[in-house]
Every structure is written in structure tokens, then in C-alpha cells.
Image (cartoon, rainbow, N blue to C red):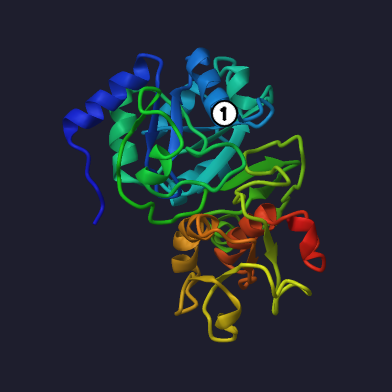
Amino acid sequence: MMAVPSDSEIRQAAAWLRSGRLVAFPTETVYGLGAEVWNERAVAQVFALKNRPRFDPLIVHIAAREQLQELVQAIPDEAQRLIDRFWPGPLTLVLPKSERVPDLVTAGLSTVAIRQPAHPVALRFLAEAGVPVAAPSANRFGGISPTTAEHVRGQFPSDQVLVLDGGPCPVGIESTVVACAGGVWQVLRHGGTPIEELQRVLGTVTEAISVTDRPLAPGQLARHYAPATPLVVLAEGIPAGAESLRLGLLAMDGSAERLELFQHVELLSERRDLTEAASRLFAAMRRLDAAGLDLIVARPVPEQGLGRAIMDRLRRASSRASPERPEAIR
């Protein structure tokens, strides 16, 4: 059952945010670590607490579409079609920013990433705050994204971050990020809105998924969403020579596995449902990371629908160590 903060808790969180402090709040995707977008000192605290590099831009969350007017220069017709179809929801639009948006929020880029979340607690909080909120995921930079309030509380001190508990995030994987370049709409990060749904609205939508150290949108860094335990993505088997290691398995289901090879097993969906698998991904990765393993073996999922977002997260979380040389991970 979803946790439902009281009206007084929502008011307290909004007042806390407007006073220049940080609030972690639930969205349908993951928990965000929020600061008032106009308060550069508060935004700087987000980067400092997360240990996030300032060249990685933030997503701005809004309660109502009317707030777009103070954040962007213009809303193209096709962007409006996406807004009408997918907001509130797990879709982030990258648009030319207004002069008022601080460069710190956008990492100095001329564009700003914006979305209206679908979670009822997020919308109540954002409406009460009355200001746009810059909010990356509420976790230490590069680590596994949080999908429960407990995930957040375990990482940040309570005197610095107020946590609104809205229960587990139902989508469980970050928003899709899209932008228009040269008249063509592109997916910059796969997420909770599959590209197939975008194509039904716009027709042509291409992929521009980058692995870079200088991102143009959130979620483009080469290594991200990563557990402390090394993780490799393998279609079958285990790395040669890994028999003596404590192994964990992350898979859609266990039907084709020799489960006795693994000390800890996390199955994302016995029904092979990609929506269910996405909602469970980060929590499963956290449990594996806490199990005292030497190596996590992740199985690929079909790269369609939300499967693209799942595979993007697994690839960015994977160890740089070669799966053929397990000794390299020690």
C-alpha cells in the first residue's frame, strides 16, 4: 500500500524547500533529491551531497504545465503533443531554456530538462512548494537509484534532507529523456516511456543514446546506476574460472538457470513482464549488493518496450572487468 503523507507533512516539506533546504520526494520513477530551482545555493547543495559533478545537468520537476513559461523560451508544437499525451508521467523534455534558469541547473547548457511527475505525493508537494524543483535521483552519485524512502534515508543525514515517504515507486526506473535536434526528435535516455509509444505520437523518433563523460542530458555517463559489487552482463553461463566466487544472479526468471551456482538470486518477473521487471530492478540490485557477493551476473532482457531502459541501466552498471578474467574484479 502506498504511504500517504499528511497535509501537514506536505506543508512542512514545502516550507523546508522554500527555506533553501533539500527534500527527497517520491515520483513514479525513483525518489528525487530536490532543491528550489531558483536558489543556486540550494542547488549547489544537491551536487555536494550527491558528490555529483557539476557538468551533469539536473531535471526540473513541475506541478503544472503553466510553470513551463518561466523555464523555457518556447514550446514547439511537437513538444506540446508529447506533453498532452504523456504528462504527468515518466517523460522528460529537453527544451531551450529561459534566461532565468541558473546555469548550475543545466550544467551551462542552453537547454533545460523538464518533466511533470505522475506520483500523487510529488504533485501535492510540488503544488504546495509553488516553485519548480531541480531534482536528480536521491542517491550518491553513480550508485543505484532509490525506489523507497528507506533507500534514501540510508544515504543522507536527516538534518540535511527531509524525506517524504510515498511508498515504493511504481515504475521504478528513471524517465525517458527526449530532445529535438535538427528537426528530428531523439531519445537521449531510455526510461519509463518506451520509444514505441513516442513513435505512435510523432512518427519518427530516433535513438541518440550516448556513453560519454560530458553529458547533454541526465543519465548519459558511461558508468552509472552501479552497485559496489562488480556486475557483468552475460547471456548465459558464468565467467570462466568464477566457480570459487560468491556469485549473485539477476535475471528475468530462473527457468534456464543452474540456480545452485549462485549464492543469491533475484528474479525480476517470473511472468517475463517487462513492466514488473523494471519496477523491481533497482531494489533487486540493492539486495544483491548487500549480500556479500564477489560478482553479480545479470542476464539480458528483450530490448523492446521497457526492456531497452533495463538494458541501458545494466550496461552502465556493469563492471569494467572482463567477464573472462574474474580475478580482475577482486
Residue at the extreme front of the image, as rendered = 244
Residue at position x 35%, y 14% from top? 19
Image vertical order of residue 226 relative to residue 135, above or below = below
The one of 250 and 307 positioned closer to us in this rendering: 250
Give the residue type at disc 1: Ala
Image quarter (top left, top right, bottom left or bottom right) of the N terminus? bottom left
Image vertical order of residue 60 relative to residue 252, above or below = above
Image vertical order of residue 279 relative to residue 15, above or below = below
Residue at position x 45%, y 62% from top? 280
Image quarter (top left, top right, bottom left or bottom right) of the C terminus? bottom right
Where is residue 183 drawn, in percent x and y?
72, 43
Where is residue 4 drawn, in percent x and y?
22, 44
Give the secondary structure at mark 1.
loop
Q: Can residue 208 be seen in this view?
A: yes
- How many numbered tags mark residues here? 1
Q: How crowded is mark 1: few (under 14 residues within 10 Å), some or many (20 or more)?
A: some
Residue at which label 1 appears: 74
Q: Is residue 72 visible?
A: no
Residue at position x 78%, y 74% from top? 240
Residue 303, quarter of the rendered image: bottom right
Image vertical order of residue 120 relative to residue 247, above or below = above
Left or right of 14? Residue 227 is: right
Where is residue 15 drawn, in percent x and y?
29, 19
Left or right of 269? Residue 324 is: right
Where is residue 229 drawn, in percent x and y?
62, 54
